[in-house]
Image (spheres, helix red, strand yellow):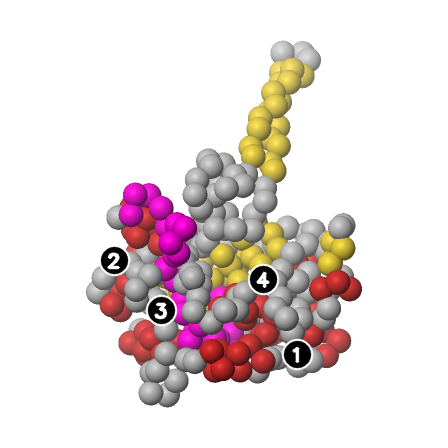
Amino acid sequence: MTNRQIPTKAEVDSYLKDTNWGRWGSKGSAGALNLITRQKRIEATHLVKTGRTVSLSRPLAVVPANDNPRPAQHFMHKEKRPPNGGAAMDYYGVFYHGTATTHIDALCHVWNKDGMWDGKNPDEVIGFDGANYGTVDEWKDGILTRGVLLDVPNHRNTPYVTIEEPVHGWELDDIAKAQQVDIEPGDAVFVYSGRDKYAAANGGQWGTVDGRPGLHASCLPFLKKHDISILGWDMMDVQPNEYNVPWTVHGAIFAYGVALVDNAYLEDLSKTCTEENRYTFMLTLNPLFVKGGTGSPANPIAVF
C-alpha cells in the first residue's frame, strides 16, 4: 500500500480483521460516533461563517428503476373538516437500504463470517422486530460534527469515476492534501465521485448487471487511519469486487464501527465548496428514532 499497489486478498482480509472491537467498552453500540465529543461539536459550530446550507439528500425514490427495484411509496389522503375546511395527509413506505434512497447505515446492518460490529453474533442480535446492538436509536440525539468533502472528479479533472478506475485510499490522502484539509478524528468524510454525471452519460443508469463504479477496498486503511466517524458517498463500493468477500468498503461498518451515508447527493455540495473555496463545513444529520433499526432515511445538511 505504501507503494500504491493494489492490495492482495490477504491484505484486504487483514484490513477487515484490524478492528475497533471493544474499543469503546460499554458505549460500543454507538461505534465510531463516540469520537464526536461535546468539544468536537462545539468546534464544528465554529465552521459556520455565512449561514449557507446545502442538502446532501436525494428526493425520496418512488420511481422503479434498475438501481431502485424496491421503490418508496408516497400516497396522499384528503378529507373534509367541517365547516368548509379540510386536511391532507401523507403515507410514506420505504425500503431505504439499497442504491436509491439517501440513508444512514447503523452498525447492525451488515456483517461477514467473523461477525457483526464488536464481534456480535447476528443470530443473537437481529430479531423480527429489531436488533439489540449497534442500532440507529443509539444516535437519536442527532449527529453534529465537522464534515469534509473529498472531490474526486475535481482532483482527476474528469467528470466522474469509472468502473475501470475506482477510487483508491492513497488517492483520498492525495485529495485531502491538495485541498489543504487534515482529516481529524470524528470527522464525517464525504467522497464525491460524480455519480449523477456518470448516470447521465450511461443511459441514466449508475449501477447495472455489469457492476458499478465507486471506492476500492484499498480505501479501508484510510478510514481506519484517520479515525473518521462517518463515511458518506454518492457511488459506494465498486462492484464487483475481486476479493471474494461479501463487503469491501461497507466492511467499515462491522470492522471499525463507522456509520455510512449511502446514496448521498453531492453535486450541489461540490459546487458550493468550490464557490466558498473551502471543503470543510458543519454537518448535521438526525436519523429517525426507530428502536432496533438498522438505519434510517436521512437528509444530511452541510452548513457553511
How far across and how far down the image is residue 158, in percent? Answer: 23, 62
Q: Amino acid at mark 2?
A: Pro
| Nearest to viewer (mark 2 / mark 4) | 2
Q: Secondary structure at mark 2?
A: loop
Contact between labelled residues 2 and 3, with CB atoms less than 8 Å apart: no
Q: CA distance from mark 2 to mark 4?
A: 31 Å
193 lies left or right of 291: left
Residue at numbered disc 1:
21
Residue at numbered disc 4:
143
Residue at numbered disc 3:
167
For the record, the magenta segment spans: 202-231
Contact between labelled residues 4 and 2, with CB atoms less than 8 Å apart: no
Residue at the outermost bottom position: 2
Question: N-terminal of the two: label 2 or label 4?
Answer: 4
Residue at numbered disc 2:
159
Q: Residue at x 51, y 74 (%)?
A: 228
Q: Amino acid at mark 4?
A: Ile
Question: N-terminal of the two: label 4 or label 1?
Answer: 1
Q: Secondary structure at mark 4?
A: strand
Residue 65 falls in which quadrant of the image? top left
Question: N-terminal of the two: label 3 or label 2?
Answer: 2
User: Taken as a whole, is the magenta stretch helix, strand or loop?
Assistant: loop
Pick the residue in front: 246 or 293: 246
Q: Amino acid at mark 3?
A: Val
Q: Quick one: label 2, few (<14), some, or many (20+) residues within 10 Å?
A: some
* Residue 74: image tag: none
Q: Secondary structure at mark 3?
A: loop
Question: N-terminal of the two: label 3 or label 1?
Answer: 1
Contact between labelled residues 4 and 3, with CB atoms less than 8 Å apart: no
